[in-house]
Amino acid sequence: DKPGCPGCESVSFDDVVETMANKLPEMHGQIGVFVLDKIVNNDAVNYVKIRRSKTYGGYDLRNLETHFKKEFKQLYIGGGGHPGAVSFRIKKTTHEDFKKRLDAVFSNIG
């Protein structure tokens, strides 16, 4: 153990991200989004984690897959999940291009 941090070796970045991804939507009562840089099958990807709060049950997040495919076209690698939590993998593009396409995806939530 590290001084002042008992048990820190057992905490991984993925554990922290998962906790934050689940906590953020609950704190605000809506939908939370995390975008992580990852390497998947030797490709640099944007890994998009989307979660909704338990009280925000009016939208099935799986419906976003159609919009991800439409907006990201050949950059879309894949994704899936369940009504309250999904993840999508997108090949890296410029920050501006990614943001523009992601904004278009999210304009379909309503």
Image (cartoon, grey):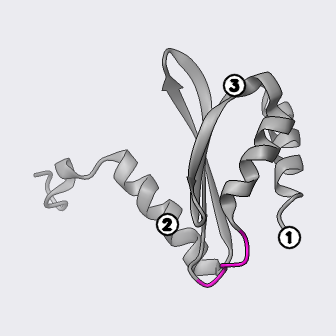
User: Closest to the observer: 19 or 80?
Assistant: 80
Query: What SS does tag 2 mark?
Result: helix
Q: Position of residue 50 (x, y in %)?
A: 62, 57
Q: Amino acid at mark 2?
A: Asn
Front position in the image: 46 or 88? 88
* Neighbour tally class for label 3: few under 14, some 14-19, many 20 plus, Cα within 10 Å: some
Compared across the picture, whether 51 is left or right of 5 comes to right
Element on which disc 1 rests: loop
**Range covered by the magenta-colored residues:** 55-59
The residue to which callout 1 is attached is 110
Q: Position of residue 45 (x, y in %)?
A: 61, 28
Residue, disc 2: 22
Give the residue type at disc 1: Gly
Quick check: can you spot residue 47? no
Tell me the element at label 3.
loop
Residue drawn at x 56%, y 60% as measured from the top left? 85
